[in-house]
Image: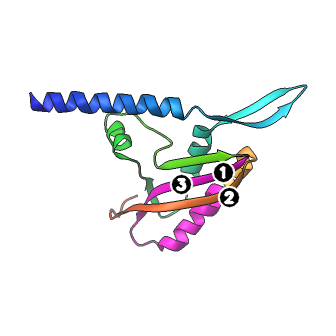
Amino acid sequence: MIRQVLRDALLQLIKEETHMERETDKNTYLLQEDENAGAVQIADDVVAMIAGLAATEVDGISAMAGNITHELMSKVGVKNLTKGVKVDILDKHVTVDLSVTVDYGYNIPATCQKVQMKVKTAIENMTGLQVTDVNIRIAGVNMQKNR
């Protein structure tokens, strides 16, 4: 009985937080506007996805780390490509905050510098936006040998 109540409360919390994320993450930004061709807009979720994918391509980064809701959602099969990524876009300038898990044995400062450069380059090349900061928080160390 208690398990069922806890499970229902947890599912409701996930549902509410997911709904709130969908509402707040719908911010779009004008990349280009042409009187003859129309406008090109990009959602901040897209910029966050680019950042997350670029970060995980760097050797030594085990995974992106998310909050408890992201972790629980992934356990029930919902995959979120913006997990562990927060972007702020203001006047075509982007600030990125990443939360990552690093593989054991890698030099953390050197790995993070590679991540910063990879994320900055990917966002700037794909969107034309200027990345001003890529801030990284190490959320954990992956101790498993097989990656």
Query: Which is nearer the N-term, disc 2 or disc 3?
Result: 3
Q: Marks 3 and 1: CB-CB under 8 Å?
A: no
- For marks 2 and 3, give the CA distance: 11 Å
Label 3: how many residues lie within 10 Å, few (<14), some (14-19) or many (20+)? some
Percent of width and height locating residue 115: 57, 61
Percent of width and height locating residue 20: 45, 31
Q: Which mark is residue 94?
A: 1
Q: 73 above or below 89?
A: above
Q: Secondary structure at mark 1?
A: strand
Q: Which residue is mark 2?
A: 132
Three-letter code for the amino acid on which mark 3 is drawn: Asp
Quadrant (top left/top right/bottom left/bottom right) for the N terminus:
top left
> Magenta residues?
91-120
Label 1: how many residues lie within 10 Å, few (<14), some (14-19) or many (20+)? many
Percent of width and height locating residue 105: 41, 73
Residue furthest toward the right? 36
Q: 50 above or below 5?
A: below
Q: Residue at x 36, y 39 (%)?
A: 74
Q: Marks 1 and 2: CB-CB under 8 Å?
A: yes
Residue 138 visible here: yes
Residue 53 visible here: no
Q: Nearer the viewer, residue 49 or 146?
A: 49
Q: Left or right: where does residue 32 sit relative to residue 100?
A: right
Q: Residue at x 24, y 30 (%)?
A: 9
Q: Left or right: where does residue 12 sit relative to residue 49?
A: left
Q: Left or right: where does residue 126 sit relative to residue 25?
A: right
Three-letter code for the amino acid on which mark 2 is drawn: Thr
Query: Which is nearer the N-term, disc 1 or disc 2?
Result: 1
Q: Which residue is mark 3?
A: 97
- For marks 1 and 2, give the CA distance: 6 Å
Label 2: how many residues lie within 10 Å, few (<14), some (14-19) or many (20+)? few
- For marks 3 and 1, give the CA distance: 10 Å
